[in-house]
């Protein structure tokens, strides 16, 4: 059994920074979350970092004008980060600071049982009934987009439409989300495998990333 935490930072192909904390399997859920958060806090490039929350419940970095998104799956924490945006209102959705991340174990068969709850009829044609990996990709993609939209109560199934799935090999996926006003927002999806998990990131084509420019198609 692993007894220590591992911290790793990587720059994803779409220019989003992703930090991973894993290990510590001997700790219970509450203690694990506290210790994983501490490992993240102490590995800042310049200073100790504290994850706080906006009134909507979305995560934020205390005293730092950076959009972040957080996901926790088992004994793994992932924090995705965009460059500082000092003039942006991070409490509101904006296509230039849109970011969401989600992770799920690639062997999580439970997702097959809730297929009809999160897939639209057209999406069920895109995703074969018994294809576990495709279902994991679809689930994490919708979760990541939901987080990026900063809209509590957004209809997870019907307001988020998958056009194509990303692959763990690096090809991007495409989707759109419908805001309560009816406005549609286009999303790009990037996914990779880490420690037996699929990690999926959602940004818009206008999101400002660490490439110093908006995301490319």
Image (cartoon, rainbow, N blue to C red):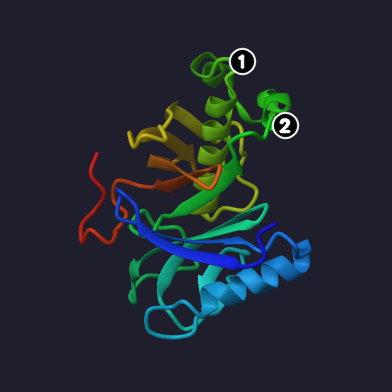
Report the front residue among 118 and 24.
24
Report the front residue among 117 and 129.
129
Number of other residues with Cα within 10 Å of mark 2, as a class: few under 14, some 14 to 19, many 20 or more: few
Relative to 206, 153 lies left or right: right
Q: Is residue 106 above or below residue 13?
A: above
- Which residue is at a point 37% across and 70% down the rendered structure image? 88
Number of other residues with Cα within 10 Å of mark 1, as a class: few under 14, some 14 to 19, many 20 or more: few
Q: Is residue 210 above or below residue 54?
A: above
Residue beneath disc 2: 110
Q: Secondary structure at mark 2?
A: helix
Report the front residue among 187 and 22.
22
- Which residue is at a point 53% across and 26% down the rendered structure image? 134
Relative to 87, 52 lies left or right: right
Relative to 137, 116 lies left or right: right
Q: Is residue 110 above or below residue 20?
A: above
Residue beneath disc 1: 129
- Which residue is at a point 76% across and 67% down the rendered structure image? 30
Report the front residue among 158 and 162.
162
Quarter of the image with the C terminus in it? top left
Quarter of the image with the N terminus in it? bottom right
- Residue 173 visible here: yes
Res. 156 image quadrant: top right
Q: Position of residue 132 (x, y in %)?
A: 60, 25
Q: Secondary structure at mark 1?
A: loop
Q: Position of residue 75 (x, y in %)?
A: 65, 56
Q: Position of residue 179 (x, y in %)?
A: 50, 44
């Amino acid at each position: 059994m692993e007894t220590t935490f591992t911290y790793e930072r990587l720059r994803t192909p779409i220019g989003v920074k992703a930090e991973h904390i894993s290990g510590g399997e001997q700790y219970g859920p509450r203690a694990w979350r506290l210790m994983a958060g501490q490992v993240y806090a102490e590995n800042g490039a310049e200073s100790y970092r504290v994850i706080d929350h906006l009134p909507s419940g979305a995560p934020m970095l205390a005293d730092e004008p950076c959009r972040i998104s957080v996901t926790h799956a088992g004994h793994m924490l992932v924090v995705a980060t965009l460059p500082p945006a000092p003039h942006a209102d991070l409490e509101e959705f904006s296509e230039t600071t849109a970011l969401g991340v989600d992770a799920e174990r690639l062997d999580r068969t439970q997702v097959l049982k809730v297929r009809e709850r999160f897939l639209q009829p057209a999406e069920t044609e895109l995703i074969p009934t018994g294809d576990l990996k495709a279902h994991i990709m679809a689930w994490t993609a919708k979760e990541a987009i939901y987080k990026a939209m900063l809209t509590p109560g957004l209809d997870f199934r019907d307001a988020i439409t998958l056009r194509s799935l990303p692959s763990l090999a690096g090809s991007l996926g495409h989707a759109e989300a419908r805001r309560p006003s009816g406005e549609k927002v286009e999303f790009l999806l990037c996914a990779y495998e880490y420690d037996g998990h699929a990690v999926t990131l959602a940004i818009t084509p206008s999101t400002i990333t660490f490439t110093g420019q908006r995301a490319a198609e």
